[in-house]
Amino acid sequence: RPLPKLPVPELHATLATYLKLVEPVVSEERFANTKRIVQEFLQPGGVGEKLQKQLVETAKTKENWVSDWWLDDMYLLNQLPLPVNSNPGLVFPSTSFESDREQLRFAAQLIVAIFDYKTILDE
C-alpha cells in the first residue's frame, strides 16, 4: 500500500504556527514587526498567495513537494558539520518495561515496522 502524498499545509496555519513559535524567543518590538511582515505576506493577491499557489501546483506533479528543497537546504547547501547539526534519528518517550522480554518484544515490533515502511518506500 503506497504512502499518501504529503499535503501542502494551508498558508494561514503555517504562519500562525510560525508566529506562535517565534513569539517566545524575540523581543516584543521584533515580534510586532514580524507580525506586520506576516500580515503583509498574507494579503490577498500578495507574495504569500502566489507562492502558496506555486507550492500547490508543484505538489500536483511531485511525489513529495518538499523533498527537493529539504535535501538541498538541509544537507547539500548546509556548510555546518552535518553529524552535529542534523538528526535523522527518532526520539521516543521514556518507557519503563516490566521485563527484558517486554523490551525485546518492543524492539522487535519496531524493527518489523521499520522494515515494513522501507518496503513501502522501495516499491
Image (tube, grey):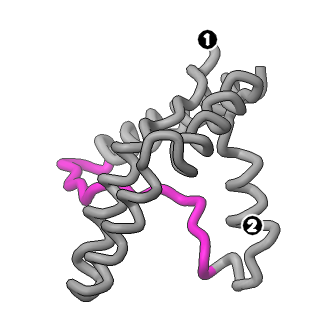
Q: Which residue is mark 2?
A: 75
**Category of crowding for the residue at label 2, using alpha-carbon neighbours closer than 10 angstroms: few (below 14), some (14–19), many (at least 20):** some
The picture places residue 105, in percent across and down from the top left corner, at 38, 37
Q: Residue 88's image quarter?
A: bottom right
Name the secondary structure under disc 2.
helix
The picture places residue 41, in percent across and down from the top left corner, at 46, 56
Q: Which residues are magenta?
A: 84-100
Looking at the image, which residue is at 57% across and 51% down?
47
**Which three-letter amino acid code belongs to the residue tagged 2?**
Tyr
Name the secondary structure under disc 1.
loop
**Which three-letter amino acid code belongs to the residue tagged 1?**
Arg
Q: Is residue 34 above or below residue 109?
A: below
Which mark, by number, is residue 1?
1
97 falls in the magenta region: yes
57 falls in the magenta region: no
Whether tag 2 and tag 1 are in contact, CB under 8 A, the answer is no
